[in-house]
Image: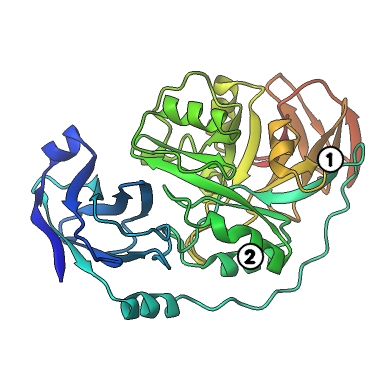
Amino acid sequence: MTLFEQSGTWRPVDRAAQQVQTLSFEMPEGVTAFRVGLEFDRSGGGVLDLGCDGPHGWVGWSGGERSSVVISEEWSTPGYLPTAVSAAEWHVVVGLHEVPAAGVDYRVVVSRATAADVAAERRAQPAAPPVPERPPGRDLPAVDGMRWLAADFHAHTLHSDGALSIDELAALAVSRGLDVLAVTDHNTTSHHAHLAQVGERYGITLVPGQEVTTDRGHANAFGDIGFVDFRRPGRQWQRDVAERGGILSVNHPLGGDSCWRMELDQPTAVAEIWHSSWHALPVLRNWGGPLAWWLSWGKDTVPIGGSDFHREGSDALPGSPTTWVLCEGQDVLGGVAAGRTAVGVDPQGPVLLRVGDELMALGADGALLSTFEEGRRRIVGDRVVLPAAAGPWWLEDDHRCVLALCL
């Protein structure tokens, strides 16, 4: 049974006027589950994103990854919250990600779904893999009873445009030697409810996150703080996250068409200084752009790193780069907020840590210790302690490729 249908052509003028379009419809009485379908002509380069807003708030987002989703109180397609269906006004949200000059033809259909439809969709989800063996941990110095945990602050699952379930991603992260992984699916919080249980099963801390995603920049909002509305200005993201006790971090600020182009009340205190794209190509390995951005954004900005993992074979693996966080217990976000971070190329690569007024370089024999001031110092030995003023500091090779960094 069709509940709503609309078709037409989105044109560049529509995208220029409103990049996120809202199609409203009335849900009739008696519906307990429904399916939203989005069809569009992909042949000319058009890309449309799909989401849903309900009478009681945001339901979810699948971007351009899915053409059909199911929503019910019992279960919804990953990316969408299980939501009671009530007779009220609902909204199909369509993002006009790419609209060619000739336009893109589309068709949106909302139809009633049965309990059998919901059950079939649920059964089709991947099974949880076994718990993998964890590699040996690094011998990093404890500081005032705190210990360093290996983290990755940017990764995706089936709840947005990732290829793996939360269980599969957790297993992969453990096999890579990570202690912590932030799951940061795009414009949704549907994954948050599952993280604690999955993390306990696999022996890894899964941090609730969401990548607030627009065509003018992306930012990760960390913490179980509710949905941060990507349709609002960046200043509002910043205020909402602060009021709710979370952390906002600008993502891949120099990342091509997703680079940061939004105004904020003030620079974020935390930023993804090291995104996996920094070392994605040989030509980028000694690219100074991220360091230059760090200097201009603020030298006291707390650095974190993210693999931005989506699927094996097309992205860096979890932990590339690795963010080391000095934590009290498992309070990873507390360690980040306090600025106790260091970033390295991977879990087993060189590490540069700040311990009080000293720097400790581990596994970095032959690397050059550098800062924004003139001069570099050669590291001799696998475990070297040096006095140091406030940073940033980084280790680089003779070709100026960054290997590790810290404040």
Question: Number of marks in the image?
Answer: 2
Q: Is residue 188 left or right of residue 358?
A: left
Q: What is the secondary structure assignment of the residue under circle 1?
A: strand
Q: Is residue 290 left or right of residue 158?
A: right
Residue most toward the front? 29
Residue plotted at (79% across, 42% down): 327
Residue annotated with mark 1: 361
- For badge 1, the amino acid type reads Ala
Q: Is residue 102 left or right of residue 297?
A: left
Q: Quadrant of residue 42?
A: bottom left
Quarter of the figure that contains the N terminus: bottom left
- For badge 2, the amino acid type reads Val
The image's mark for residue 292 is none
Quick one: label 2, few (<14), some, or many (20+) residues within 10 Å? Answer: many
Quick one: label 1, few (<14), some, or many (20+) residues within 10 Å? Answer: many
Q: Nearer the viewer, residue 88 or 199?
A: 88
Image location (x, y in percent) of residue 297? 55, 22
Residue annotated with mark 2: 198
Residue 355 visible in the current orientation: yes
Residue plotted at (70% across, 74% down): 131
Sequence-earlier tag: 2 or 1: 2
Image location (x, y in percent) of residue 219? 48, 38
Marks 2 and 1, how far apart at CA: 34 Å
Q: Nearer the viewer, residue 100 or 218?
A: 218
Residue plotted at (78% across, 44% down): 351
Q: Quadrant of residue 20?
A: top left
Q: Nearer the viewer, residue 310 or 38?
A: 38
Image location (x, y in percent) of residue 172? 63, 67
Q: Nearer the viewer, residue 59 or 132?
A: 59
Q: What is the secondary structure assignment of the residue under circle 2?
A: helix
